[in-house]
Structures are given as structure tokens and as C-alpha cells.
Image (cartoon, rainbow, N blue to C red):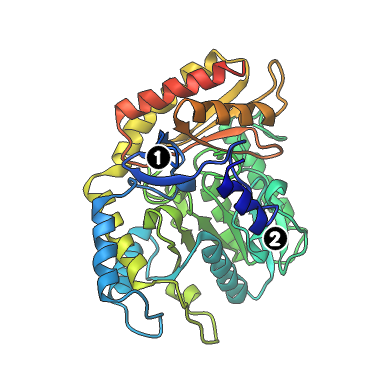
């Protein structure tokens, strides 16, 4: 055990997870690579949990942070803040929500808390619909709407949560159906659920479930849900903490794969927009955002330094068409991984979009989740010089692959080769 690991264990909660049998200290990064304390270089296919969205040590972002820190680091939302207003204007315009207002937080968890506060206040209801296998953060209220027991340490909640089918296409009672029939069955389930309960405040859903193992429904499910929700006056909250900013390649926001009936009422974001800086936020139409009848501020949300980073990062992403790069390079990577998976008895499915790819592992010849294999592949990939993540539903048996959106084709090929070797080591 390293000295730093020993010190970590002495002062940190037992439930604060670390990857790897020999936990890794990352000291610096550049582009799509990071280095550990021993000087070893790794290709990063997880980006600090989908947070280093563009690149490590991106010069445009580090320059903006340094220049803003040299002027003023902090002021709070009690004062006018030019970088915050400028970033809010850009996010509002990009969101697709009409008459949009933006509130900045420091994390995705806090953003989802705020969305829940808005929805329950606007609707006068503490009842919330959420998706099975979902994850929305680690605060008390976010845990209460999380449909993944590995990340839900308590059933106590200020909210009454009801869980809906549809977030996982290839498991569950409707997996045998075609896409059209799957959507019809999930809509019927929602209709039936609403017939047995008081009117909920909102449905909160990740267009692609992140911690749940990069699972998603067929395109159009949430548009079909929207028709039902609108009849009941129920709001739709799209949790874009992991799917936002073009990561899926095909769309800038995940909700756009379900946009037939318009944008969500509330959109939450975080992670990638700051490229590692602590930024989260909520976008909602003015009528919903302004429903609170008490004062509120954010001490750290919208800080001048993080907003400067967000502006520089968003500009870089748009100017360099990183959404298009995610589509092109991600498409190549997922095809490589599917070819590799076809030859592995442990791989049940390779799924995802753009640079958001999951590899689900099972015990050979069964549909039984294989968390031991996932842990072993994680270790083997590290030994090969590649960092990936893991997640999943009933058991943590999905490899999560989400590199920075500037990933190059040679780097994608290199990562696929390392993953192939790692999978062979557990077959």
C-alpha cells in the first residue's frame, strides 16, 4: 500500500470508492493522456467521469482560468457577473427551451436538486416519476429518485418516487419486443401508473443512463411519454449531466433523440461544460424558473473563474466541431469494439452513441451479470495503459468508455487494441 493510499484511508469515509487494487494517483494530463505519480502515461477513456470533455490541460481553458483568477476569483451571485451572464446567454440559446432562464450550480447533483425544487414547487406536488436503473446524484433528494440500488444508500426521501419502465432496452419485461412495441408497452405502463396515483410533479430521465451502464430506450420514447405527461400537466426534466454538449455525436443534447414533441420543461447539465471545473446548472422556461416565492442565491455557483472556463471550453467545442468528431471517431470506435465483443464469450452487448459506449459483461453462456470480469478488465486495461470506467444496473458489470471529445482515430484504435487484450485476459 502506498503512503498516500494509507493516508487516504485514515481520513476518508469507508464508502468513498477508489478504482484499482493499487489506487492510482494522477499527477497531470495533456490532451487525451494522463500520467501517474510513477511517471507512467495512460490513454484516458473515462475523462474524470465524463468531465474532462475536450482535453486535459486545454490551453484555451487554462489561459481563461488564469486570466480571470488574476482579476477576481469570487464574488457570489449577489453581484453582477459578466462571465456568468455571457455563459448563461449561450446556454439558454443552445438549450432549445423557449424563454429560457439559467441558474448555475457547482455540480450535477445540485442541478438536479434545483430542478426538483422547481418542479415540485411549480406543480404543488412532492411526487416524482423516475426511470428504473437511473442515477441523478448523491444528495438526499437525488438519492431518493435514483433507481440503482448500488448508489442508493437509503430509502428515506422528501419525495415520493414512482419508477417507470423504459430506460433499459435489452433487459427487463419488455426486452423481447421490437422498438415500436417496446415504446407502446412503456407508454401503457406510464398511463396505468398515472391512473393509480395523484398527479406527479415531473418525470426526470437521463436520455442515456450514465452510471446505469450507458443504457437507453429506442429513440422517441420520451416524446411518446411527453404526450401523456402533457395531458396530466406533468413536467419533463431531462438530466443531461452526461449526455449534453454533443457527447452522443448525433445530437447536442440527449433529449433531441426524443424531441418530436418539443424540448423538456427543465434541462440539467454539469460535468463536461467546465472541462474539470465545478460547473452545473439548470435551464427552464421563465414561468417554471420564476415560480419560487422566496429569495435564493448561490455562493459558488456561477463563480467568475468557473464561468470563464466554461465559456472558453464551450467556444472550443463549437469552433472545432467536437460533436462531429464524437460522431465520426465514436462510430469507428464502437464498430471496433463490437467486432472485438463478437469474439468474446463474456460480452453480452456493446452499446452507445458517439463517445459514450458501454460493454456489458456476463458469465459465458448466460445472461447473468459478471461484475468480477468487469473489475478484472478494468485492472487489465490499466496495466495495458488505458483508463476506463465501470457501472451497470443490478450488478456493476458494464465497462464505461467516454474519452474526451477531441479523441483522434489513432487513439481510438490504440484504445480498442488495449481493450481487446484486456478482454482476452478474462475470457
Q: What residue is drawn where x is 47% and y is 61%?
A: 267
Describe the element under mark 1 as helix, strand or loop.
Answer: strand
Q: Of circles 2 and 1, which is in front?
A: 1
Q: What residue is drawn where x is 40% and y is 48%?
A: 52
> Considering the image in quadrants, where does the C terminus appear?
top right
Can residue 332 be seen here?
A: no
Q: What is the x, y in percent for residue 285?
A: 44, 70
Disc 2 to disc 1, how far (Cα)?
37 Å
> Considering the image in quadrants, where does the N terminus appear?
top right
Q: Place residue 34 in its image quadrant.
A: top left
Residue behind mark 2: 144
Can residue 409 be seen here?
A: yes
Question: Is residue 320 rendered to the left or right of residue 335?
Answer: left
Q: What residue is drawn where x is 64% and y is 30%?
A: 177
State yes or no: discs 2 and 1 in contact (Cβ < 8 Å): no
Crowding near pointer 2: few (<14 within 10 Å), some, many (20+)?
many
Q: Residue furthest top?
A: 343
Residue behind mark 1: 35
Q: What is the x, y in percent for residue 23?
A: 57, 41
Question: Is residue 166 rendered to the left or right of residue 206?
Answer: right
Describe the element under mark 2 as helix, strand or loop.
Answer: helix
Q: Place residue 327 in its image quadrant.
A: top left
Amino acid at each position: 500500500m502506498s503512503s498516500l493510499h494509507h493516508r487516504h484511508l485514515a481520513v476518508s469515509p469507508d464508502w468513498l470508492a477508489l478504482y484499482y487494487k493499487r489506487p492510482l494517483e494522477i499527477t497531470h494530463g495533456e490532451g487525451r493522456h494522463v500520467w501517474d505519480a510513477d511517471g507512467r502515461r495512460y490513454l484516458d477513456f473515462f475523462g474524470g467521469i465524463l468531465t474532462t470533455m475536450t482535453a486535459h490541460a486545454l490551453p484555451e481553458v487554462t489561459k481563461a482560468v488564469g486570466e480571470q483568477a488574476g482579476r477576481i476569483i469570487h464574488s457570489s451571485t449577489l453581484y453582477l457577473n459578466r462571465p456568468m451572464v455571457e455563459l448563461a446567454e449561450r446556454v439558454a440559446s443552445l438549450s432549445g427551451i423557449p424563454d429560457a432562464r439559467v441558474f448555475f450550480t457547482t455540480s450535477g447533483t445540485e442541478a438536479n436538486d434545483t430542478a426538483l425544487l422547481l418542479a415540485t414547487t411549480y406543480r404543488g406536488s412532492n411526487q416524482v416519476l423516475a426511470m428504473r436503473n437511473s442515477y441523478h446524484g448523491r444528495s438526499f433528494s437525488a438519492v431518493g429518485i435514483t433507481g440503482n440500488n448500488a448508489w442508493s444508500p437509503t430509502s428515506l426521501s422528501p419525495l415520493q418516487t414512482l419508477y417507470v419502465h423504459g430506460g433499459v432496452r435489452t433487459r427487463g419485461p419488455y426486452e423481447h419486443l421490437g422498438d415500436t412495441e417496446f415504446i407502446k408497452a412503456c407508454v401503457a405502463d406510464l398511463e396505468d401508473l398515472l391512473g393509480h396515483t395523484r398527479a406527479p410533479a415531473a418525470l426526470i430521465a437521463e436520455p442515456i443512463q450514465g452510471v446505469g451502464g450507458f443504457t437507453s430506450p429506442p429513440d422517441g420514447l420520451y416524446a411518446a411519454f411527453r404526450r401523456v405527461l402533457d395531458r396530466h400537466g406533468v413536467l419533463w426534466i431531462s438530466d443531461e449531466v452526461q449526455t449534453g454538449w454533443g457527447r452522443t455525436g448525433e445530437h447536442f443534447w440527449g433529449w433531441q433523440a426524443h424531441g418530436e414533441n418539443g424540448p423538456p420543461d427543465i434541462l440539467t447539465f454539469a460535468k463536461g461544460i467546465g472541462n474539470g471545473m465545478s460547473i452545473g446548472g439548470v435551464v427552464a422556461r421563465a414561468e417554471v424558473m420564476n415560480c419560487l416565492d422566496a429569495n435564493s442565491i448561490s455562493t459558488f455557483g456561477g463563480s467568475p473563474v468557473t464561468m470563464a472556463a466554461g465559456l472558453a471550453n464551450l467556444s472550443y467545442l463549437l469552433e472545432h466541431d467536437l460533436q462531429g468528431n464524437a460522431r465520426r471517431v465514436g462510430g469507428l470506435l464502437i464498430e471496433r469494439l463490437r467486432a472485438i465483443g463478437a469474439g468474446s464469450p463474456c460480452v453480452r452487448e456493446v452499446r452507445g452513441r458517439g463517445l459514450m459506449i458501454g460493454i456489458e459483461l456476463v458469465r459465458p453462456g448466460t445472461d447473468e451479470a459478471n461484475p468480477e470480469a468487469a473489475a478484472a478488465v478494468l485492472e487489465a486495461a490499466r496495466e495495458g495503459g488505458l483508463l476506463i470506467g465501470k457501472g451497470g444496473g443490478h450488478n456493476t458489470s458494464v465497462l464505461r468508455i467516454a474519452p474526451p471529445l477531441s479523441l483522434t482515430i489513432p487513439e481510438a484504435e490504440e484504445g480498442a487494441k488495449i481493450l481487446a487484450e484486456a478482454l482476452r485476459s478474462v475470457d
